Image: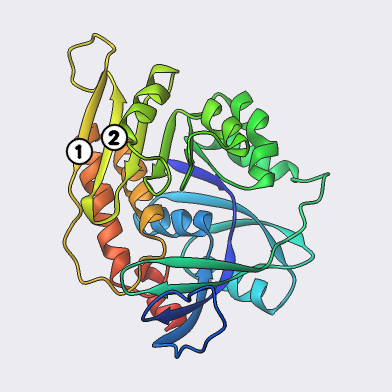
């Protein structure tokens, strides 16, 4: 039976607007090249990827009892994701302004209210029964860090465009066995990745877009000295249709391969291959193509 993964974090309903350039900060008019609606949210992206790879995955997210929430629930359910949804007053919605080069401005149109008495006991049980827990950046996930640590399960997290200093990210960073991020705001990521592993994580990865990714892993060269080892992986060439979800797919591919026992280099290549499969669709994952069109 596939290893189970419990993911805690956002799922949303998004409108994607493709532009020839991002808007300048002055009053003006632009014409959209294309637009569509789809499932969004970093945790939804990871859950879709892992389910498509054959993993037994449960996703805990706050979703409203509204039309957009029903669209999210139906699409995730049809994609094989077990949804541990908690009813909220509204569903998270974004309007993502995109360019063909992958530049993005995300406008948050609504965010769900996080009830202080959540989550339900089935979420705690799902984390305790999982082989790996993924905690994505969200207030609910942040409150669940102590519960996740108490399970003794490995914790993976995605810091996204972390700058190395933001305080909100710190509990995720300190609790996690594997840390992922992108290089948008960190400068040279290598010193930070090394520091993450030196503080106790087994793996730290920074994705670099078209340049692939670099990773630092503990004792992954097989000599048993415990020293961090540097790894690099190239991006897989592909005709890019939309970049939303590529980072989530990369992490899902690495996690899937790691659970299968792959060494770090092979896991990174699996992540790059999985990310490439997402770049060719306008949805978070190709599994949504027949569902959302």
| Residue at image location 34% in from the left, 41% down from the top | 206
Q: Within the image, what quadrant is residue 287 found in?
A: bottom left
Q: Within the image, what quadrant is residue 274 found in?
A: bottom left
- Is 137 situated above or below 108? above
- Is 58 situated above or below 128? below
Labels 2 & 1 near each other (Cβ < 8 A): yes
Q: Which residue is mark 2?
A: 215
Residue 243: image x %, image y %?
36, 66
Which residue is outermost to the top?
225
| Residue at image location 46% in from the left, 85% down from the top | 35
Q: Secondary structure at mark 2?
A: strand
Q: Which residue is mark 1?
A: 232
Residue 24: image x %, image y %?
48, 75
Q: Secondary structure at mark 1?
A: strand
Residue 286: image x %, image y %?
35, 70
Asked whether 105 or 150 is in front, the reply is 105
Which residue is outermost to the front?
26
| Residue at image location 17% in from the left, 48% down from the top | 234
Q: Within the image, what quadrant is residue 227 found in?
A: top left
| Residue at image location 56% in from the left, 34% down from the top | 172
* Residue 205 seen anywhere in this rendered image of the structure: yes
Q: Is residue 205 left or right of residue 31?
A: left
Distance in Å between CA atoms under marks 2 and 1: 6 Å
Quadrant of the rendering where the N terminus is positioned = top left
Residue 219: image x %, image y %?
26, 18
């Amino acid at each position: 039976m596939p290893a189970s993964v419990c993911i805690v974090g956002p799922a949303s309903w998004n409108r994607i607007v493709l532009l020839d350039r991002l808007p300048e900060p002055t009053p003006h008019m632009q014409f959209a090249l294309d637009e569509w609606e789809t499932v969004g949210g970093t945790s939804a992206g990871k859950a879709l990827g892992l389910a498509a790879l054959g993993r037994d995955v449960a996703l805990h997210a706050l979703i409203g009892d509204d039309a957009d929430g029903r669209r999210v629930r139906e699409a995730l359910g049809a994609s094989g994701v077990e949804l541990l949804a908690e009813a909220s007053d509204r569903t998270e919605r974004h309007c993502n302004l995109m360019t063909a080069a992958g530049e993005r401005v995300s406008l948050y149109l609504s965010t769900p209210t996080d009830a202080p008495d959540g989550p339900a006991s089935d979420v705690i049980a799902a984390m305790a029964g999982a082989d790996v827990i993924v905690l994505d950046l969200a207030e609910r996930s942040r409150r669940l860090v102590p519960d996740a640590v108490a399970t003794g399960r490995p914790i993976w997290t995605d810091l996204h465009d972390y700058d190395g200093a933001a305080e909100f990210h710190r509990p995720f960073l300190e609790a996690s066995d594997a840390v992922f991020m992108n290089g948008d705001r960190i400068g040279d990521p290598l010193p930070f990745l090394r520091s993450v592993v030196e503080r106790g994580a087994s793996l730290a990865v920074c994705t670099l877009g078209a340049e692939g990714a670099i990773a630092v892993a503990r004792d992954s060269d097989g000599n048993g000295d415990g020293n961090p080892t540097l790894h690099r992986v190239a991006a897989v060439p592909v005709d890019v249709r939309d970049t939303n979800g590529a980072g989530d797919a990369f992490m899902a591919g690495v996690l899937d391969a790691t659970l299968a026992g792959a060494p770090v280099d092979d896991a990174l290549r699996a992540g790059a291959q999985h990310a490439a499969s997402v770049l060719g669709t306008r949805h978070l994952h190709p599994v949504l193509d027949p569902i959302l069109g």
